[in-house]
Image (cartoon, coloured by chain):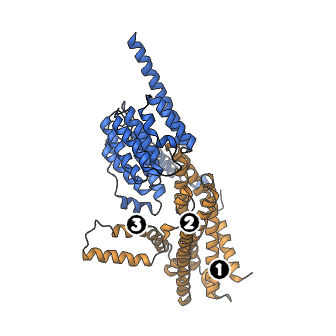
Amino acid sequence: MSRDERPLTTVPGWVWLALAACLALQLVWAGMRPGMSHRAEDLPPPPRLAALRLASLGEPEALARLAMLYVQAYDLRGANDVPYQDLDYQRLVAWLRVVLALDPKSEYPLFSAARIYAEVPDPAKVRVVLDFIYREYLKDPNHRWQWLAQAAMVAKHRLHDLPLALQYADAIDRYTSAPAVPLWAKQMRIFILEDMNELQAAKVILGGLLASGSVKDPAELRFLERRLEELEARQARQAKGGKESLH
Amino acid sequence: MPAAAILARFVLLEARRSGLPWLVGASLAAALGLAAFVSQVALTESIALQSAFSAALLRACAVFLVALHVAACTVREVNDKGLELMLTLPLSRSAQYAGRLTGYVALGVVISACFALPLLLWSPPVAVLLWAASLALETALVAAAALFFSMALVQPVPAFAATAGLYLLARAIGAVQSIAASPLAEPTLAHRLAQWAIDVVALLLPRLDAATRTEWLIYGAPSAGAYATALAGLALYSVLLVAAGLFDFHRRNL
């Protein structure tokens, strides 16, 4: 107790009671409030780039990353059996495009597109995302090649669209010129044509990315490890299902 | 010790004995806690996210704390007639003003150094050093603005509102200009007049969007030319605010 305060006993009883009652009421009120959940169909259209720039107050890098956290909260698996089944992909891609324009050096939008939103079972949605990756790749091939490499893998193994996969592989070879781009990426056409399954191809790409030092972020490493484990489990389930059907 | 230096020391002493050190500590704790939270929900670029988020938050906290502290202390001193008492001393008005401002600038340097330390967890030391130096100069500019408005308006809320308005406008003016120059806009006379008015306002403001950039922390240090230009702009505007403050203080009849 400081010298500016009087003892607690000087506070009238009704004030004590009112304080306790109001606090209890607030706790009950807040406890009854339903939790905020972002449903996929709630994803609003993105603001204009100029509006985002204005709102960033000269901090576009921070705002771009916070905007990605906001977007990824929509339908992030949620209670869906099929991930992102309700997400409006045209709006999603518009968000990714505007965030990338806000901070063109950020890898978050293209990472999300290639590794999360392109890995859905709906081919139409996958094509929307792959087209976004391809268009954005053309704007800065030397820094965005790894996302097109992943898009090529998705085109081959998820869409089973070999010409599209080869188009992306050829684009990596044609438009990249930086010495930092590894040889395996420039020669992607060869191992797209090879008879590899998705797990083998994913391991080759991930191994190549790790060896070239392109993946350093601990969160991304954890995510990729988890994704590889999921892929291994799925392949094992498919192999087991295949054997059982033979018997 | 020169009189101005003694006055500056008292300003720092007052800051140390106020709740300011606790607020600096609370800002650091909030930035570190929120950075840890956002890194847990990030799927990639978690280090860049922590660095960018903390830097943006700490920059805003530094400016807010300095502006509010300067406005509150100056207005209290005027209202308590402390300033009148000081004017009876054999000290020139310029020395009194400079002494106070030096103390507030030193306070900004200390806060900037404290706020730069956690950024070393995620960004290279050279980039953090450049960011901290820029933040120190930015807080010096804010201190000069807050002192000027506090002396001129002599009320805490208008003084802080004017300082915050100047600061926010200076950070947003680049984006406002690019919106005004948008090729999608109709080239009417009214639009041209609005664009011209915005360009005139921009001439009267410092380019705070070019200083203390988060980009330096996550994508590497800026070029020497760009950095020097940004800091020279801040220094020039700070001197302008000091000159305006001295002009107002000298002609004030206290």
Residue bearing mark 1: B99
Decide: few, some or many residues near mark 1? Use Cα within 10 Å; few <14, some 14-19, many ≥20.
many
Residue B139 position within the rendered picture, expressed as x and y whole percent measured from the top left? 57, 69
> The disc numbered 3 marks a residue on which chain?
B
Identify the colour of chain A in the image: blue
Residue A57 position within the rendered picture, expressed as x and y whole percent measured from the top left? 45, 63
Residue bearing mark 3: B175
**Residue drawn where x is 34% and y is 34% of the image:** A161
Residue A131 position within the rendered picture, expressed as x and y whole percent measured from the top left? 34, 45
Residue A231 position within the rendered picture, expressed as x and y whole percent measured from the top left? 46, 29
Is disc 1 placed on a helix, strand or loop? helix
Q: Looking at this view, is A180 or B139 the one in front?
A: A180
Is disc 3 placed on a helix, strand or loop? helix
The amino acid at mark 1 is Gly
> The disc numbered 1 marks a residue on which chain?
B
Q: Which quarter of the rendering shows the N terminus of chain B?
A: bottom right
Residue B237 appears in view: yes
The amino acid at mark 2 is Ser
Residue bearing mark 2: B223
Q: Is residue A5 above or below residue B206?
A: above
Residue A115 appears in view: no
Q: Looking at this view, is A175 or A29 the one in front?
A: A175
Q: Looking at this view, is A108 or B150 the one in front?
A: A108
Identify the colour of chain B in the image: orange
The amino acid at mark 3 is Ala
Q: Nearer the viewer, mark 2 or mark 1?
A: 2
**Residue sitting farthest toward the top:** A247
| Lateral position of residue A159 relative to residue B58, left or right | left
Decide: few, some or many residues near mark 3? Use Cα within 10 Å; few <14, some 14-19, many ≥20.
many
